[in-house]
Image (tube, helix red, strand yellow):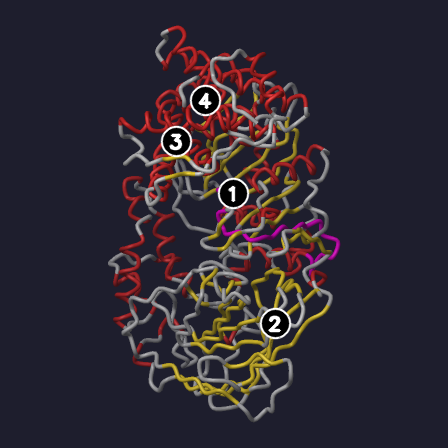
C-alpha cells in the first residue's frame, strides 16, 4: 500500500487510497533519523517535517481508520495542511457512516488545527484568526457533551506534551535509525506538542464564549441550613433544557473541585456545594462532623428550585464520596441515588486504617482547614512532611506531640486521636448499624485493588448488604488506584502492565449509571451483577452476586516454620502445633528514620524489614484468587498489643513479585475482631487471633506461580508506633520500647485464600 502525497484533491485521494490499499507491501524497514535536542528548538519542526515527508510514500496500515488518522498526522507534520484537512474529512465520513461513537476531544482538536493551518497558508490569515474562525464554525454544532470533551482536552497544559516529546527524543537518541511504527508514534508526540502550544493561548476566551451560549450558571449561591449555617454553592444547567431536570450534586471540602459543567454537559443540573467554612460561609471548618446535615439541606434546597424535577443524585471521590454517604444517612426524600469512588469512611480508612493513625491525616487536617490560598502550595510539597515524619520518629516522643514538633498543633487532629476506637464520635458521621437498612436508593461504588481507600469502599458495600440484603448496591473494582475516576485508568501502573479490558472510562461509566437510574437508559453492560471485578492477568471481567460468591472454594496455607530464616513455607499441610518461628523487633532503634515504605506493584525482590517471608510451592495448575482473604494467627508475644501488616504477592515463574493489593493490609491486633471495642492481648500467653482482610483482589495465577506472604510488625516514621503497653497508643513513647518485641509465630497459623479454579 502506498501513502498519499499532499497535493491530491480529496476525491483523488479517496481513489488513490482505495487502489493503494490492495498493493503489495513496500514498507521500509527503517529510516535514518537523529532526534532533535529539544522540542522547542527551531530545528525541531524541520527535522520532523523531513521524517514525515520520507515516511509518507511508504507508510502502510491494514486498518482503514488508523491508516487515515496516521496519514493525517504525517501530512500535518509535513506541513501539507490542505491534504491533512481532506484526509481528516474522509476519516470523519467513514466513522459517521459506520455509526461509530461520536467524535472525541482529540479528534476534533486535530480537525480544527489542520483546517486553521490550511486557511493560514492558503489565505495568508494569521493563525489566531483562522483557528478562531474554525472553532466558531465547528464547535457550536457539537453536542454539549462533545464540546465538553473538546474543552477539557484543550485545557491540558502544553508542558505535558513537551515533556512527553522530550522523553521520546531521549529514548531515540541512542539509535541512528527509526522504524516506521516508532516514527508514526514520534510524529504524533510532536504534533500533540505543536498543536497545544499553538492553540493554548486562544482557547480560554473561545471556551468561555461557547459556555455562555450553552449554559446558565450561578456562582455565588449561599444556602441556609436549618441549624443556621451558611453553605456556599454554584450551579450550571444547560440552556437547551425545555423542562426541569434531575440534578447531580457534589458536596466538597476542597474548593478546587467543580464538575458542575461536566454534569450539565451530560444533561443534568450540576451543583457543587462546599463544606461550611469554605468560600462565603463564615462558620468554622470542622471536617466530617456537620456534612451530613448540611448536604441534606442542599439536597432539599435543590429539589425546591424551578429548574429541578425533584430528583437529586450525589457523587464524589474521597471526601465528596463520604459526604454522599453522610447525606444518605439523613434520608432526604429528594436523594435518589449516590455514586462514589475512593470514598472516605471516617473512623474506618481515615484518619486511621485498621485503627492505626497515619501522619498524612495531620497534614490533611491542616490543608483543609487552611483558608489562605497563598499557603495551599505548601501542602503539595512532600519534602517538609517527610522531614517532619523523620523528626518525630527520631525524637521518640508521643504521637500526640506530632503537631508540636511542627509548631502547628491542630485541635482537630488531637480530637481524632482521642477516639482510637470506632466509637460514637465516628458512628454519627456516616450510616452505622441499622441505619444502613433504611438506605434503599441505588448506589454505585467504584474502587481499585491499589486504592488506599478500598477498606472504606468495602465497609460501605458490605455493611449495606449485611443490614439490607435487598439493597440496590453495585460494586465495580479493578486494577485501579484512588485517582482512577479523576484521571482515568493507566495502561501501566508503575511497572505493571494492566489488562486492556480494564481500561474503561470509569468517569463516563458513572454518568451512564446515573442515566440508567434517573433517565431510564440501559444499565451499563459492564455492571452485570452486584459485584463486578476485573480479573488481573486474564483480560476479562467477571460478575458475582456477592464478594463471597466471587470464589467457589478456598485454599488454606499454614505458616510452616520450615525453610531458611528469610523464606519460610506456606504449606497446605497442617504443621505440628509446637513448631514456631521467633521474631524480635526493637522499637528503640531509629537508624532507619529515612526509610520509606516501598510502593512498587511489581518488583524482582522483596524487602522483609521487621517482617517474615512465607512462600508456597509452585501451583500445579492455574487458579483465580478472588475476594477477601482471612486467617488465624497462633502466637505468643511479650506485649499487650501490636500493629501488624500483611502483604500478598504472586511470584511468577519469571521471578516477578506482583503485589495483589496495595498498600499493605494493616491492623491493630487489639481491634482485629471488633473495631469498636479494644481487646488487649495476653502478654506471654499462647493465643489465637482471627482476622479478615479489609483489602480484596482478583488475579489469575498461572501454573508454576507461587503465593508469597509477608507478615510484619509495623514500625514506620509515617505511622503511630504501638509500643504494646496496652495504654493509649498516642501517649506511648520510646521510653515504653523496652523490652523489644519477642514473638513466636506457631506453625498452625494460617491464611485462607478464596479461589476459583
Residue at horizontal 50%, vertical 76%? 669
Question: Picture coordinates of residue 134 (x, y %)?
Answer: 46, 14
Whether residue 118 can be seen here: yes
| Alpha carbon distance from label 1 to label 3 | 23 Å
Frontmost of labels 3 and 4 is 4
At 35% across and 64% down in the image, what residue appears? 596
Q: Are marks 2 and 4 in contact (CB under 8 Å)?
A: no
Q: Quadrant of residue 249?
A: top right
- The image quarter containing residue 756 is bottom right
* Label 1–label 2 contact, CB within 8 A: no
Q: Report which residue position mark 4 lands on.
A: 75
- Choose mark 1 or mark 2, whichever is in front: 1
Q: Which residue is mark 2?
A: 630
The residue nearer to you, when weighing 220 against 626, is 626
Label 1 belongs to which residue? 488
Q: Give the residue furthest to the right.
A: 470
Label 1 residue SS:
loop
Asked whether disc 1 touches disc 3, contact meaning CB atoms under 8 Å apart, the reply is no
Amino acid at each position: 500500500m502506498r501513502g498519499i502525497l499532499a497535493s491530491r484533491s480529496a476525491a483523488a485521494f479517496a481513489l488513490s487510497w482505495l487502489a493503494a490499499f490492495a498493493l503489495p507491501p513496500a514498507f521500509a524497514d527503517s529510516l535514518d533519523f537523529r532526534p532533535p535536542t529539544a522540542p522547542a528548538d527551531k530545528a525541531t519542526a524541520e527535522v520532523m517535517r523531513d521524517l514525515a515527508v520520507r515516511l509518507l510514500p511508504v507508510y502502510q496500515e491494514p486498518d482503514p481508520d488508523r491508516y487515515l488518522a496516521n496519514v493525517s498526522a504525517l501530512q500535518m507534520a509535513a506541513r501539507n495542511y490542505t491534504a491533512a484537512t481532506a484526509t481528516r474529512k474522509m476519516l470523519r465520513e467513514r466513522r459517521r457512516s459506520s455509526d461509530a461513537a461520536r467524535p472525541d476531544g482529540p479528534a476534533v482538536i486535530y480537525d480544527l488545527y489542520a483546517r486553521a493551518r490550511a486557511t493560514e497558508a492558503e489565505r495568508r490569515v494569521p493563525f489566531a484568526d483562522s483557528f478562531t474562525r474554525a472553532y466558531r464554525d465547528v464547535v457550536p454544532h457539537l453536542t454539549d457533551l462533545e464540546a465538553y470533551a473538546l474543552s477539557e482536552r484543550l485545557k491540558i497544559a502544553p508542558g505535558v506534551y513537551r515533556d512527553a516529546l522530550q522523553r521520546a527524543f531521549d529514548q531515540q537518541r541512542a539509535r541512528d535509525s527509526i522504524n516506521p511504527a516508532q516514527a508514526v508514534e514520534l510524529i504524533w508526540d510532536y504534533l500533540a506538542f505543536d498543536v497545544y502550544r499553538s492553540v493554548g493561548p486562544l482557547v480560554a476566551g473561545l471556551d468561555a464564549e461557547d459556555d455562555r451560549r450553552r449554559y446558565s450558571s450561578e456562582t455565588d449561591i449561599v444556602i441556609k441550613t436549618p441549624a443556621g449555617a451558611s453553605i456556599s454553592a454554584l450551579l450550571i444547567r444547560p440552556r437547551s433544557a425545555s423542562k426541569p431536570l434531575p440534578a447531580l450534586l457534589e458536596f466538597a471540602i476542597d474548593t478546587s473541585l467543580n464538575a458542575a459543567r461536566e454534569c450539565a454537559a451530560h444533561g443534568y443540573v450540576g451543583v457543587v456545594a462546599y463544606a461550611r467554612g469554605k468560600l462565603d460561609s463564615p462558620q468554622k471548618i470542622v471536617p466530617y462532623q456537620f456534612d451530613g446535615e448540611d448536604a441534606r439541606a442542599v439536597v432539599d434546597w435543590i429539589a425546591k428550585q424551578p429548574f429541578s424535577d425533584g430528583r437529586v443524585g450525589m457523587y464524589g471521590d474521597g471526601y465528596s464520596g463520604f459526604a454522599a454517604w453522610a447525606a444518605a444517612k439523613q434520608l432526604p426524600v429528594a436523594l435518589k441515588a449516590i455514586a462514589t469512588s475512593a470514598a472516605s469512611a471516617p473512623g474506618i480508612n481515615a484518619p486511621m486504617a485498621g485503627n492505626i493513625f497515619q501522619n498524612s491525616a495531620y497534614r490533611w487536617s491542616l490543608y483543609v482547614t487552611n483558608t489562605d490560598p497563598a499557603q495551599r502550595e505548601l501542602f503539595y510539597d512532600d519534602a517538609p512532611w517527610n522531614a517532619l515524619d523523620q523528626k518525630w520518629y527520631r525524637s521518640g516522643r508521643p504521637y500526640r506531640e506530632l503537631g508540636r514538633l511542627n509548631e502547628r498543633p491542630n485541635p482537630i487532629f488531637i480530637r481524632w486521636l482521642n477516639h482510637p476506637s470506632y466509637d460514637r464520635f465516628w458512628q454519627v458521621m456516616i450510616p452505622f448499624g441499622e441505619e444502613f437498612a433504611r438506605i434503599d436508593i441505588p448506589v454505585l461504588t467504584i474502587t481499585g485493588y491499589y486504592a488506599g481507600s478500598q477498606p472504606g469502599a468495602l465497609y460501605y458495600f458490605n455493611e449495606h448488604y449485611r443490614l439490607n440484603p435487598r439493597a440496590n448496591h453495585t460494586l465495580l473494582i479493578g486494577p485501579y488506584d484512588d485517582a482512577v475516576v479523576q484521571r482515568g485508568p493507566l495502561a501501566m501502573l508503575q511497572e505493571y502492565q494492566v489488562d486492556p479490558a480494564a481500561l474503561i472510562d470509569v468517569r463516563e461509566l458513572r454518568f451512564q449509571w446515573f442515566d440508567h437510574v434517573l433517565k431510564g437508559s440501559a444499565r451499563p453492560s459492564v455492571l452485570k451483577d452486584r459485584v463486578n471485578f476485573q480479573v488481573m492477568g486474564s483480560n476479562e471481567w467477571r460478575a458475582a452476586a456477592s464478594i463471597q460468591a466471587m470464589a467457589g472454594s478456598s485454599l488454606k496455607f499454614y505458616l510452616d516454620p520450615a525453610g531458611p530464616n528469610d523464606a519460610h513455607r506456606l504449606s497446605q499441610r497442617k504443621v505440628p502445633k509446637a513448631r514456631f518461628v521467633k521474631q524480635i523487633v526493637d522499637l528503640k532503634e531509629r537508624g532507619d528514620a529515612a526509610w520509606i515504605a516501598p510502593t512498587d506493584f511489581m518488583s524482582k525482590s522483596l524487602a522483609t524489614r521487621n517482617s517474615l517471608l512465607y512462600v508456597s510451592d509452585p501451583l500445579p495448575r492455574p487458579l483465580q484468587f478472588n475476594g477477601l482473604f482471612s486467617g488465624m494467627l497462633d502466637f505468643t508475644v511479650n506485649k499487650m498489643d501490636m500493629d501488624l501488616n500483611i502483604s500478598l504477592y504472586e511470584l511468577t515463574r519469571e521471578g516477578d513479585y506482583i503485589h495483589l493489593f496495595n498498600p499493605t493490609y494493616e491492623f491493630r491486633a487489639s481491634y482485629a475482631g471488633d473495631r469498636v471495642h479494644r481487646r488487649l492481648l495476653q502478654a506471654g500467653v499462647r493465643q489465637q487471633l482471627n482476622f479478615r482482610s479489609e483489602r480484596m483482589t482478583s488475579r489469575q495465577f498461572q501454573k508454576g506461580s507461587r503465593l508469597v506472604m509477608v507478615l510484619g510488625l509495623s514500625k514506620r516514621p509515617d505511622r503511630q508506633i504501638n509500643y504494646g503497653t496496652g495504654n493509649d497508643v498516642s501517649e506511648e513513647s520510646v521510653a515504653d520500647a523496652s523490652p523489644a518485641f519477642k514473638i513466636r509465630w506457631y506453625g498452625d497459623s494460617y491464611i485462607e485464600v478464596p479461589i476459583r479454579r
